Image (cartoon, rainbow, N blue to C red):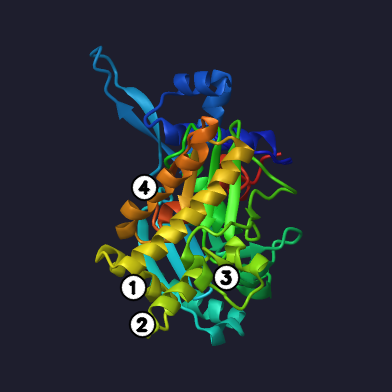
Amino acid sequence: MAKVRKEDKLPLRLKQLGKIYRLVEQFEEISRIDLSKLSQLAPATITALTRELIEERLIIERAVQNTESRGRPAVGLCVSPFYWQALCAILAEDHFDILLCELDGTPISQQTYPLTPTDLTDLESVLICHLLHFLNQVQRQLNHPITFSIAVTGELDKTDNRLCRLGKTEMNLDLQALFAPHFNIPIIVTEYFQTWLLAENTLGSVIGCDNVLFVQLGDVINLSAVSQGEILCRNGHSRITIDKMIVPKLSPVQEAINPDLPEIERYQVMNQITHKAVYRLIDHFYPQNNLADNAEKIYFLCRKVKEGEAQAVEILNHLADVTAYILMNLVNVFCSKKIMLSSGLPEEVKDVFLPRINETLNNYLAPNGQTADVITSQYEWNSPVVVMAAIKQGIYDGSLLGHLIKDVQ
């Protein structure tokens, strides 16, 4: 399991409680004896820790019938499937999703609020208005929220965690301060890339992989790397952008993007495979598409690909080939065998896009005797599992438990 190297000053008791909760979640109906063996904590300590977690309604006891004897049923421990809930949100440049979930990620209610360019000029008021509307809608369902967690598809300032970019829009907004007056529970503000990284690392397809690249194609191109089981960080942050990597001329399609830019800028990946570049390609090759909504343009392209239209397939191949080229360079730097890719493309074209990337990438790597496997995220954009990842991490490391357990020193 990948870990983030960071210094924390949490009381040992909270970290132990988080560790036990995680083990109970991982091994359903686990006994206290097995918990002691796996955690390497004394049986008396396990008894005290599990008592606290039961009192806080985070775990429950469940009778487990021992098939090897007729004696008294054994007692196993499970994560509580009720009581605690989580409020989650995803803030993007064009929409604000709010979800109410059980602590296991089961959605209770979900609402998407579109955002217009005008909304972004008064974002504070708009967000609070949408939040209050949602809370009013779910007031009968809302019971015992453990936290409010918001993930932004942009960039948080590395010093004070303020929102400094949303999509491609420059911002200066303290989301923590904005929402604090409306809650008496902890508020978690993260970048969506970070929550996706945590979800894939702890629950997704790369569990147990010690050397993995995480690449996200979107308004910018984000990169994170797991090396020897640890998430590499710089100044406490695991995400870097690689927008200014330069690719060579790989296809005639590249000439159609940003022809007014100097050549060295035109071939930066930010002007080749980001969402903005894809929208421009679609408008260039399909000038009559008359689609104002960018998401609709992506679905329009994918529909053309599924119909086998040559121009659309050529655009998709361009995206795959440029992506494969930058992945080749990253594999050579990090020696990774597996790459988790979030492309932002609908599922219906991944059966074309993904094989093309893998074939092209491994053709690049073959002369050096290397191979790499590119896989795509198993989670949808607004999957409760992804938005819950930051909350689960807060429980696992104990930082959220301090709000519940006040007398820990």
Which residue is drawn at the image coordinates 43% and 36% (left, top)?
A: 25
Q: Amino acid at mark 4?
A: Pro
Seen as rendered, the residue at the extreme top is: 69
Q: Is residue 159 above or below residue 77?
A: below
- Describe the element under mark 1 as helix, strand or loop: helix
Quarter of the image for residue 222 reads: bottom right
**Sequence order check, earlier mark of 1 and 2:** 2
Q: Is residue 253 above or below residue 213?
A: below
**Sequence order check, earlier mark of 4 and 1:** 1
Badge number at residue 289: 2
Mark 1 Cα within 10 Å, few/some/many (few <14, many 20+)?
Answer: some
Which residue is drawn at the image coordinates 54% and 36% (left, top)?
A: 52
Confirm or deny contact between disc 1 and disc 3 (CB under 8 A). Answer: no
Confirm or deny contact between disc 4 and disc 2 (CB under 8 A). Answer: no
Q: Amino acid at mark 3?
A: Gly
Q: Nearer the viewer, mark 3 or mark 4?
A: 4
**Sequence order check, earlier mark of 4 and 2:** 2
From mark 4 to mark 2, how far is it between C-alphas? 28 Å
Question: Residue 352: x and y, percent?
Answer: 33, 54
Q: Nearer the viewer, mark 2 or mark 3?
A: 2
- Nearest to the observer: residue 169 or residue 285: 285
- Nearest to the observer: residue 121 or residue 282: 282
Question: Residue 399: x and y, percent?
Answer: 63, 46
Whether residue 82 sits left or right of residue 156 in the image: it is left
Circle 4 residue: 355
- Nearest to the observer: residue 40 or residue 155: 155
Confirm or deny contact between disc 1 and disc 2 (CB under 8 A). Answer: yes
From mark 2 to mark 3, how far is it between C-alphas? 24 Å
Circle 1 residue: 300
- Describe the element under mark 4 as helix, strand or loop: helix
Quarter of the image for residue 249 reads: bottom right
